[in-house]
Image (tube, rainbow, N blue to C red):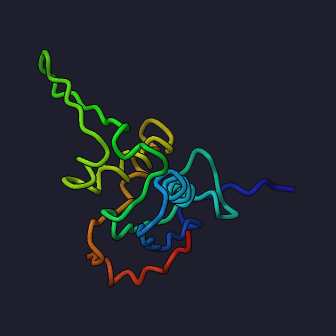
Amino acid sequence: MKSFSVSSKDIYRKWYYVDATGKVLGRLSSTIAHYLRGKHKKIYTPHLDVGDYIIVINANKINITGKKNKKKIYYRYTGYPGGLKKNSFSDILIKFPERIIKKSVLGMLPKGPLGRCMFKKLKVYSGKFHNHTAQKPIFLQV
């Protein structure tokens, strides 16, 4: 009896879209990471990228639980001495709402080249319109 090994011709990727309106950040991000990795498929292989494409719309309407709206701090470093920048969740939600979901999902994917390849299949938009209507994405209920 031979073992089945996934090859590139066996991988078929679908396009899904998610509406982030009123969703909790962590729960939404874990579902997105699950689909980006391909864990919902029968042919899931840990060392291959078999996941699907995910489009997130209305990223500016994401929710977060508790008092994290003011207490959650995002750090970034410019590379210069004294260049540590801090922003709260509410500040980033106003300026760059896409970054919140991207940073959350990126932390749930594998580190290294495989995780970066999976992350490229995530498309996040702050409004309700996206540029991927030609791919005919399927609505993903979260």
User: What x and y, as percent, mark residue 90?
Assistant: 28, 49
Identify the residue at horizontal 37%, vertical 46% (top origin): 69
The residue nearer to you, when weighing 87 against 139, is 87
What quarter of the picture does the C terminus occupy? bottom right
Q: Relative to 95, is 19 on the left or the right?
A: right
Q: Residue at x 37, y 37 (%)?
A: 71
Q: Is residue 55 left or right of residue 28?
A: left
Based on the displayed image, in which of its 4 quarters is residue 41 positioned?
A: bottom right
21 to the left or right of 74: right
67 vs 131, nearest the viewer: 67
Residue 2 in the image: above or below residue 136: above
Q: Is residue 92 above or below residue 80?
A: below
Give coordinates of residue 107: x percent, y percent.
45, 41
Is 60 left, or right, of 11 in this rendering? left
Q: Quarter-wise, where is residue 128 in the image?
A: bottom left
Query: Nearest the camera: 85 or 81?
Result: 85
Q: Quadrant of the N terminus?
A: bottom right
Residue at 26 percent of width and 72 percent of height: 127
